[in-house]
Image: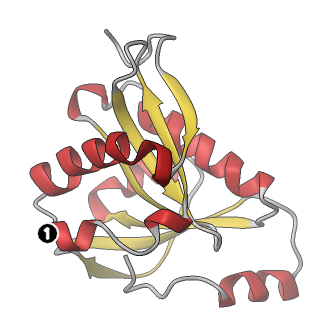
Amino acid sequence: MSARDPAIDIQAASWSDDRPAIEFVRRKVFIEEQHVPEHEEWDEYDPLCRHVLAMTKNRDAVGTGRLDATGKIGRVAVLPQYRGAGVGNAVMRYLVDLARDSGLTEAYLNAQTTATGFYERLGFRTEGPEFDEAGIPHKRMRLWIGRTNDAQARRDRSKEHPVDAG
C-alpha cells in the first residue's frame, strides 16, 4: 500500500481516546529510530493538545502530530515506509487548518534542523538560532495563517512556549 493511496485518512484524534495509536507512531519514530529518551517524549501537554492521526484503511496508525492552544505544532511523526509520499504534508495541513479554525493568526514549531526544508515547502520560515532539543539540533519556524495587526501578534507570541521547551 502506498501512502498516496486514498485509503490513508487524516483525522482528528484525542489523547484520551487514541493514545495507543499516537504512542505507537511516536515511539517508533522518536524513541526507537531517533533515540529520544522516553522521559522526554511524553509530557504534560499531550492531554491538552489537539492531535491528528494518519490511518490506513485497516485502521493502522502511520503518522501523527499535535497542536497546542498557543499555535505550537509538535510531535509530527510519520513511519519510515510512509515518508516522502504525502502523509507528512497531509498531517501538517490538517494541523495548520486546526490552528486557523481556532482563530490563531500564526502557527509555529521547533523543527529538527534536518527537516527545515520540509517545513519551508509548507510555507514556514526559520527564525532565531539553532538550539538543542532532546539531543537533536532544532530551529524555530513560523507560518502566518491569518490576518493580524501588530498588537494581536504581540499578544499571540506572549503566550508561546520558550524556544528551549519541547
The C terminus lies in quadrant: bottom left
Number of numbered labels in the structure image: 1
Q: Which quadrant of the structure image shows residue 79?
A: top left
22 lies above or below 50: above
* Lateral position of residue 82 relative to residue 161, left or right: left
Closer-to-camera residue (55/104)? 55
* x 34%, y 54%: residue: 115
* Residue placed most toward the observer, 62 or 81: 62
Q: Position of residue 102 (x, y in %)?
A: 77, 59
Side of 127 where 37 appears, left or right:
left
Q: Residues within 10 Å of mark 1 (few under 14, many from 20)?
A: few
Task: Answer above or below: position of 9 versus 91.
Answer: above
Q: Which residue is drawn at 45% across and 50% down?
A: 65
Q: Quadrant of residue 55?
A: top left
- Amino acid type, residue under disc 1 in the picture: Pro
Residue drawn at (18%, 44%) of the image: 28
Q: What element carries label 1?
A: loop
Q: Mark 1 points at which residue?
A: 37
